[in-house]
Amino acid sequence: MEKKLDLRIQKTYLALQTAFVELLEEKPFEELTVGELCDRAMIRRTTFYKHFADKYEYFSFFIREMVASFRDQLPPDVMDGQAPDYFRQMGLELLRFGHMHEKLVRNIERSSMFPILINLLLEQVTEDIQLVLRRSCPGLAEKPEKLAGIAAFYAGGLLSAFLSCTRKEPAFSEDMFLEIVSDYASSIPL
């Protein structure tokens, strides 16, 4: 059972998340400082450092929370259902986030820290995909190395295709992105 966070901690995390999104829509990640994040969130630096070592650790936390919020938006049966349903729904959530936070996505993509940031995102999405594959493909759960490889492959493809279709001049449409996501998830090798 998941431990419920103290209300003060929940409020602190929500304030940080809101401030972080606002700042990333204004500037690249490398220009963002913990001080201005704390100022915008109206929390003390000591409070921030009580929970996070630095802005990179916070970014990792932010990604985990973002993926969890995507998961929370999915219909209840999707997480326990078939992988193609999960991939399609997660694709829709990625697109929704991309539309809501286009400047943030562009600033992260243009950041000199992009390789580090995308790696943090890939790690979290890979973990989520592994969870879904364990449930929907029991044969894979018995082959942890194959499960990890397939999850990493699909996480990389999902994020790469998402970034490609959200560019100013996309290589393909959002509808094609969703079709690709669904089709390839249907072909997961057991």
Image: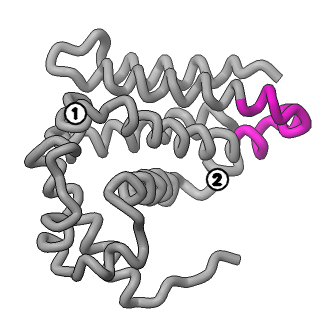
Q: Which mark is residue 77?
A: 2
What amino acid is at disc 1?
A: Ser
Considering the numbered disc 2 on the image, is that residue within a helix, a strand or a loop? Answer: loop
Magenta region: which residues? Answer: 133-148
77 versus 15 height, above or below: above
Above or below for 162 versus 90: above
Q: Residue at x 30, y 21 (%)?
A: 165
Where in the figure is residue 109, as x and y percent of width and height? 25, 30
Which mark is drawn over residue 20? none
Name the foreground residue: 163 vs 53: 53
Residue 82 position by quadrant: top right
Which mark, residue 111? 1
Q: Residue 19's image quarter?
A: bottom left
Majority secondary structure of magenta residues: helix
At label 2, counting other C-alpha atoms closer than 10 Å, the crowd grade (few under 14, some 14-19, many 20 or more) is few
Which tag is nearer the camera, tag 1 or tag 2?
A: 1
Residue shown at the point (59%, 38%) measured from the top left: 126
Res. 151 image quadrant: top right
Above or below: residue 42 compared with residue 155: below
Q: Residue furthest top?
A: 171
Q: Position of residue 70 (x, y in %)?
A: 45, 52
Which amino acid type corresponds to the residue marked 2 in the rendered image? Asp
Find numbered disc 1 in the image and state the secondary structure of the residue it sits on. Answer: loop
In the rendered view, does 82 fall on the left or right side of 22?
A: right
Asked if residue 140 is among those painted magenta in the image, a careful observer would answer yes
Q: Residue at x 55, y 34 (%)?
A: 87
Which image quarter holds the N terminus? bottom right
Question: Foreground: 184 or 125?
Answer: 125
Query: x%, y% of residue 120?
Result: 46, 42
Marked residue nearer the N-terminal end (1 or 2): 2
